[in-house]
Every structure is written in C-alpha cells, then in structure tokens.
Amino acid sequence: MTLIKDAELIDVVYKDDNNTVVLSYLSPDTGELYEIKFHKQRYDRDSNTYVDDPDQLKKVEKQVLDNYGVDFDRVSDKMGEKRDIYHYDNFDSLWEVDMVNKFDPEKDAGELFETKIDSVKDDGVAIRIGFQYNEKPYESKMSYSTYSEARHQYFPVATKKTKRYEDFEKKFGVPVEKADSIIGKNIMVEVKKFGKFAYADVKKLKK
C-alpha cells in the first residue's frame, strides 16, 4: 500500500445510469490519477453483474455522506478538494484496507514452509490465523458460516462453530478464548489446492 498525500479531486463521472460514480484524484507528487468508486448496486458473483439492492444503496449513500458531506448525486460539488488516498495494487481507497494475500492454486499448491502466527481473530464468520509468507500477510481460515443468497451475507452455523472451536483447540492446544497465547509461535503451513482455489493448511502445533 502507498499513501498518496494531498491528491486533488479533478474529475467526477457518473456511469451505469447514475448507479456508479468515479472520482479521479490527481497526485501532486506522481502526476498520476487515482480513482475512487462508489456503487449503488451490489455485485452478484453468480451473474457477474451489478444488481439493485436496497441495503447496498443505503450503505453507499451513507458512505458518501459521511466522507463528503453531500448526497451521492452532488459529489461534483467537492471538485478541487484535497485528501489522502490509499493506493493498492488493484484499487484505490479513501481508507486503509486490511489486505490479506491469496495463494495461487497453480503456482503455490504443494508449498510447505515455516512461519510464525501473527494474529488470531474470530470475526463471527471464521477463525482467522494470520501469518507472513515471503514478507506478505496471508491467513488460514477455519470457517463456520454459510452464505445466504436471500440476505446477501454470511451467517454462523451453530454446529459448525462448535466443531471448528474443537478443531482449533486440538490443533493449537488452547481454546479460541486464549488464542493470544499462541501469537508468535512457529507453525508449519502447507498450501493445498481445492478446485480453482488454494488454501493454507496449518499443521498441528507441536507441544
């Protein structure tokens, strides 16, 4: 991530029947443009298109109002405003994003390496074990949720959660509630392929 300081808003373009707004910021240091996008519609993974969604509409309208103090269709009023932009490899953002890299199923599958546990987080969807690989952040997920197409969000499944908590304690020797005690511990990680994806399998922690 690169922090672009004092970038100036020089262009605002509405697209997709005014469902998307693209804000172009010019950096005084690099002379390059950085784009911030807001979508009123929700991206549907199955159809690979944006679809109407009242929850997404409310979310974006609030984001625009909170960040610019104007309605979605009045962002052009903020032309000339300067602010810092967070630049990532594939997108730009108004705020810092906690990025986690993903393994390549073709290039990384079969890799076995030793690293240390950087973090353990239970976010209500999965237990996430964070670590570094080639000096970049990755994670292993112990998921216990399922995606609801009707609600467009993940929900924890009680039986899965119980099983994942048991699996975690067997693998790391401590309950999830005491996960902080294993931060900094050495672990062995194997990258495995599952269909079109790759995932990190953390080996059982040695006593």
Image (cartoon, rainbow, N blue to C red):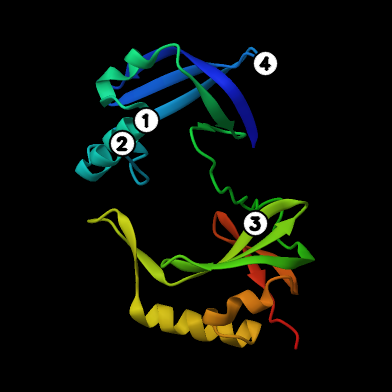
Q: Could you tell me residue 169's position as x and y percent?
A: 57, 85
Q: Nearer the viewer, residue 152 or 31?
A: 31
Q: Could you tell me residue 16's position as x and y percent?
A: 30, 22
* Residue 12, quarter of the rendered image: top left
Q: Which residue is mark 1?
A: 38
4 or 2: tag closer to the N-terminus:
4
The Cα atoms of the two marked residues, 4 and 2, are separated by 30 Å
Q: Type of residue at label 3?
A: Tyr
Q: Residue at x 56, y 49 (%)?
A: 98
Q: Which residue is mark 3?
A: 138
Q: Is residue 50 left or right of residue 29?
A: left
Which mark's residue is nearer the viewer, 4 or 2?
4
SS category of the residue bearing label 1: strand
SS category of the residue bearing label 4: loop
Q: Nearer the viewer, residue 124 or 64?
A: 64
The Cα atoms of the two marked residues, 4 and 3, are separated by 31 Å
Which mark's residue is nearer the viewer, 4 or 3?
4
Which class describes the residues within 10 Å of circle 4: few (<14), some (14-19), or many (20+)?
few
4 or 3: tag closer to the N-terminus:
4
Q: Type of residue at label 4?
A: Asp
Q: Type of residue at label 2?
A: Val
The reply to whether discs 4 and 3 touch (Cβ–Cβ < 8 Å) is no
